[in-house]
Structure formats: C-alpha cells, structure tokens
Amino acid sequence: MIMIKSMTAFATVEKTTDDLSAIVEMRSYNSRHIDMFLRIPSPYQFLEDKIKELISARITRGRLEMRLQIEDHSSETAALELDDARANALMSILGQLKSKFKLKSDITLDTLLNAGGIIKPIENPQNGDIIWPVVKECTVLALDDLDAMRRKEGDFIAADFRQRLEFINGCLNRIKKGSANLSEQYQQRLKERITSLTQNIVELDPARIAQEAAFLADRSDISEELTRAASHLNQFEQLMQSPEPAGRKLNFLLQELNREFNTMGSKIGDAAIAHLVIDVKSELEKIREQIQNVE
C-alpha cells in the first residue's frame, strides 16, 4: 500500500454551539521543515500552544497556515473592559499631534474608538473550559480533512513515481545487458582499429589484443554501480510504502541514483548506453521535482 503524502492541501471546518461559533481554516505548502503560522484572535492567544501540539502530532514537514475565527455569545464573555494604558497612550499621542500641527479639531470619543483596541473583551480564564473543546474538535476535523487531501494528492504522485521507476528499471536492465560482453566488444574494436591503421601489414597478436581488451573492460566495469542502483531503486519502492514520512530519504536516494548513473555514463564509452543514461537522468529529474512536494 502506497503511503506517500503531498505537502499541499486545504481544509476548513466550522462548528456552532449554543454559545460559541468557531471556524478553523488550514492551508499547507511545501517546506523543508515544519513551519506553523497561526492567526488567532488576541483574546484567545492562550489556545496557541494547545493548537500547535495538535498540529505537531499530525504534521511533520511543510508550511502550515491556520486561521481561527471565534464568535463567543456566552454571557460570561459578553463583558467588556477599558484598556487604560492604550487609551492614555492614544490621548497623549493625539494631543502631541494636535499641538505640533496646530489642529483645531477636538479629540472626540469617535476618534479614540476608531483607533481601535481601547475596548476589549474581559479575558476570563474559565472560558477556556467552554472554548477549547469546540476549537479542539474543529482543529482535529480540519487536520483530518487536510490529511485526506494530502493522501489523495500523494496517490497521484506515487502513481507517477511507479511509472517512472518502471522505466528506469527497464533502462537499468538494458544497460546491464549492454555491458555484459564488454571484453568481446573491445577486442573486436581493437582488431578493427589496428587493421584499419596498418592495412593488414602488421600481424595481429590475439593474446595481446585480448590483454588490452581485458584492461579496458576492467576500467569500464560497472557491476558495482549496477548493484547499488538496483538496491537504491528497491529501497525507493519500499520507502513509498512506509507509514512514516519519507520525503527526505527519497530525496537522498535520488541523489545517490544520479551519482551511480553518472558514473556508468563516464565509465562506458558506448553510445547506446550513454543514451540510456541520459534517459534515466531525465526521469530522475522529473521525480526530483515532484519529490519536493512529498512529506
């Protein structure tokens, strides 16, 4: 079963009770690490740590933005209070502005109210017992919806990976076949080259040609690279089925696969194999682009 998750998703959940309405909106994006940006109304900032704890338990990688809206209609939270410090500061600043610019207009109640923030809800710690269960339920449901969307997009990414991995495995088998008889190929090329240069004047020494061909074949041996590449491809497929987030590990394996195929291309001076290596690297690059969106 494929377990890949995308890092891109959106979810919104709303819940209403007799005294409270809450809306949680979440968006997640690509990111190398876990980054959380929460927009919570100031009277409810005390909920931030609890919300972050819920998110951290479900999301391990990606940028997550959450917006919380709360309308509390309970009698316990209907009371308001004056922010004396802010009101005094506003009066002082407005007085300075009036004096500095010789303004004739009066500082009215409307002026203070329009500045905002001087009248605020009374923060009652007891309200947490009423508010948190609703916000928690909204947050959990939003995370469920977000996770479902991430899994759904992950299925599309996994299907694309499977198709490309099948192609790469096919190329790997063709490279393995093409490199199996390198010694014989080099012997034939040496004979043809020497014959062409000497016009059959020099008698060929089969033993010496076989020795030189063996030397070239040894320098061009890619058996280790073939084994490691096959192992990396197998690990890649296994990680795709892991329940744990595997984006970073998959990205590392891609780097190793690129290294192995680069070495194969540089060791073997065969045009057909060189073309296969180019095809593989093209597919690896397409996987690399997609893997940036995998958790």
Image (cartoon, rainbow, N blue to C red):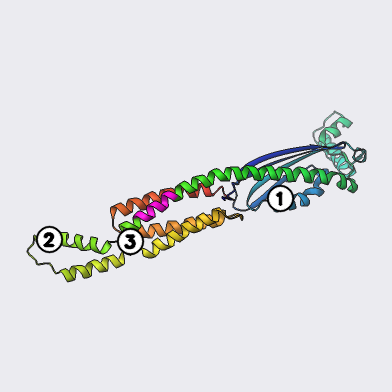
Q: Tell me: residue 104, above or below residue 163.
A: above
Disc 3 residue type (three-letter):
Lys
Secondary structure, mark 2, is helix
State the count of labels.
3
Residue hosting label 2: 195
Secondary structure, mark 3, is helix
Q: In percent of the image, x 53 and y 49: which residue is there?
A: 291
Disc 2 residue type (three-letter):
Thr
In-image side of 293 versus 12 (left or right)? left
Q: Position of residue 8 (x, y in %)?
A: 61, 43
Disc 1 residue type (three-letter):
Ile
Q: Which mark is residue 136?
A: none
Q: Tell me: residue 65, above or below residue 252.
A: above
In-image side of 214 versus 124 (left or right)? left
- Does 108 lie within the magenta span? no
Q: Position of residue 79 (x, y in %)?
A: 92, 39
Image quadrant of residue 188? bottom left
Q: Which residues are magenta?
A: 166-174
Residue hosting label 1: 55
Residue hosting label 3: 267
Q: Earlier in the sequence, mark 3 or mark 1?
A: 1
* Label 2 – label 3 distance at C-alpha: 25 Å
On the question of residue 155 being in view, the answer is: yes
Q: In percent of the image, x 36 and y 59: which residue is there?
A: 264
Neighbours of disc 3 within 10 Å: few (<14), some (14-19), many (20+): some
